[in-house]
Image: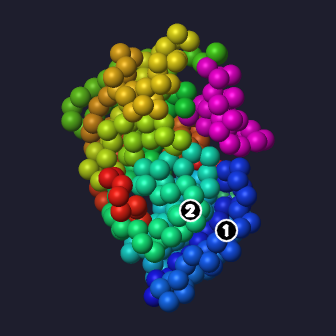
């Protein structure tokens, strides 16, 4: 008998979540799974609940929300025996998409019974803040920062903010030093550090990233003009952004980043004000996840 805890973030994404308890009840086989449902009451709550459930020996904690909720749950499950399940309800659902978790709620619930279990890598910023999809500085971090302050959520709001900020954005200079000895010093529009390949919404910022190779896939995009935007956007969704002449990539296990001053950074889409100098590393293995049997991760 599998013990499953669903943690629902009621404010994630734009879709309704009222029908989720009924769906769970209909789909999970009571002979195989015993479940409970807990709603978060504040930011950070999912992290606390997950830590408690891992110590109680729950088999799967399911993040019902977007990548922010997934991040909170997963951060408490690393190096435990409890697996992360995802019922995608966010705006981007980056980790769910990377792991092949269906976006249809009924199918995602069924996967908790018939999916595979794998161990994946995760990332750490300055030895303390964990990420599972990607983290980054530059334009995407600024947009995340503004998105968090917006009164509405969803892809439309995200796109509106991105378009508006694009007109006034001033690129900073960054210096990257990888543990491989490779260095990169340049002005950048965006620097993304990928554990998974995508930001969410099938926007592939690190198209060749594997989540099990112990490697961080860094993508630096140099300052762009309005003229570059259509092709870059196309390549982002086509999984070919590394082919653009404004893109530099590097692979490493750990990298330090120096910039002019402190500034916004995001981890799995969650923004925070980061210090001037940063260390970003990949920890190989450490998180048990439920994935689609047919998805190569
Ligand atoms: N009950 C709650 N009240 C307020 N905030 C919450 C609550 N539960 C969780 N949160 C916070 O909500 C934020 C957004 O959640 P999440 O990222 O899951 O959704 P999203 O932003 O809509 O999805 P995505 O990351 O896919 O774009 C997170 O920062 C999380 O900590």
Q: Is residue 288 above or below residue 270?
A: below
Identify the residue at image location x=53%, y=64%: 107
Q: How many marks?
A: 2
Labelled disc at residue 265: none
Is residue 272 at all visible to an observer of this figure? no
Residue neighbourhood size for the residue with mark 2, other residues' Cα within 10 Å, grouped as few (<14), some (14–19), many (≥20): many
Query: Which image quarter is the N terminus in?
Result: bottom left
What colour scheme governs how the chains and residues are painted in the rendered image of this protein? Answer: rainbow
Number of other residues with Cα within 10 Å of mark 1, as a class: few under 14, some 14 to 19, many 20 or more: some
Residue 180 seen: yes
SS for tag 2? strand
Disc number for residue 20: 1
| Main SS class of the magenta portion in the image | helix
Residue at 28 percent across and 45 percent down: it is 215
Query: Residue 137: horizontal and vertical position, in percent?
Result: 49, 32
Badge 1 element: helix
Q: Which residue has dot 2 on it?
A: 87
- Whole-Å distance between the Cαs marked 1 and 2? 10 Å
User: As drawn, which residue projects farthest toward the right?
Assistant: 151
| 108, 122: nearer the viewer | 108
- Say if mark 1 contacts mark 2, CB within 8 Å: yes
User: Going 70% across and 53% down the picture, which residue do you hit?
Assistant: 15
Q: Position of residue 30 (x, y in %)?
A: 54, 87
The mark that comes first in sequence, 1 or 2, is: 1
- Where residue 14 appears, as percent x and y from the top left, is 71, 50
Bounds of the magenta span? 141-166
Q: Is residue 86 above or below residue 67?
A: below
In the displayed structure, 259 sits above or below 222; it is below
């Amino acid at each position: 008998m599998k013990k499953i805890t669903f943690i629902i973030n009621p404010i994630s994404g734009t879709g309704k979540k009222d029908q989720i308890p009924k769906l769970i009840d209909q789909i999970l086989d009571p002979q195989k799974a015993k479940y409970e449902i807990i709603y978060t009451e504040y930011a950070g709550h999912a992290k606390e609940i997950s830590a408690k459930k891992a110590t109680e020996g729950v088999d799967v904690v399911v993040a019902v929300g977007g990548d922010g909720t997934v991040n909170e749950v997963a951060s408490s499950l690393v190096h435990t025996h409890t697996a992360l399940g995802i019922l995608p309800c966010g705006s981007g659902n980056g980790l769910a998409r990377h792991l092949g978790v269906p976006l249809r709620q009924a199918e995602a619930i069924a996967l908790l019974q018939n999916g595979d279990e794998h161990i994946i890598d995760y990332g750490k910023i300055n030895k303390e803040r964990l990420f599972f999809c990607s983290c980054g500085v530059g334009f995407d971090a600024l947009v995340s920062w503004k998105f968090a302050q917006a009164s509405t959520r969803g892809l439309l709001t995200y796109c509106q903010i991105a378009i508006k900020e694009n007109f006034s954005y001033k690129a900073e200079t960054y210096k990257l030093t990888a543990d491989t000895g490779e260095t990169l010093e340049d002005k950048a529009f965006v620097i993304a550090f990928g554990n998974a390949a995508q930001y969410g919404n099938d926007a592939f910022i690190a198209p060749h990233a594997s989540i099990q190779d112990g490697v961080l896939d860094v993508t630096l995009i140099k300052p762009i003009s309005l003229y570059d935007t259509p092709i870059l956007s196309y390549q982002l969704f086509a999984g070919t952004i590394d082919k653009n002449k404004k893109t530099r990539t590097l692979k490493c296990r750990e990298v330090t980043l120096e910039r002019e001053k402190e500034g916004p950074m995001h981890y799995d889409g969650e923004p925070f004000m980061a210090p001037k100098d940063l260390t970003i590393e990949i920890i190989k293995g450490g998180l048990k996840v439920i994935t689609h049997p047919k998805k190569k991760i």
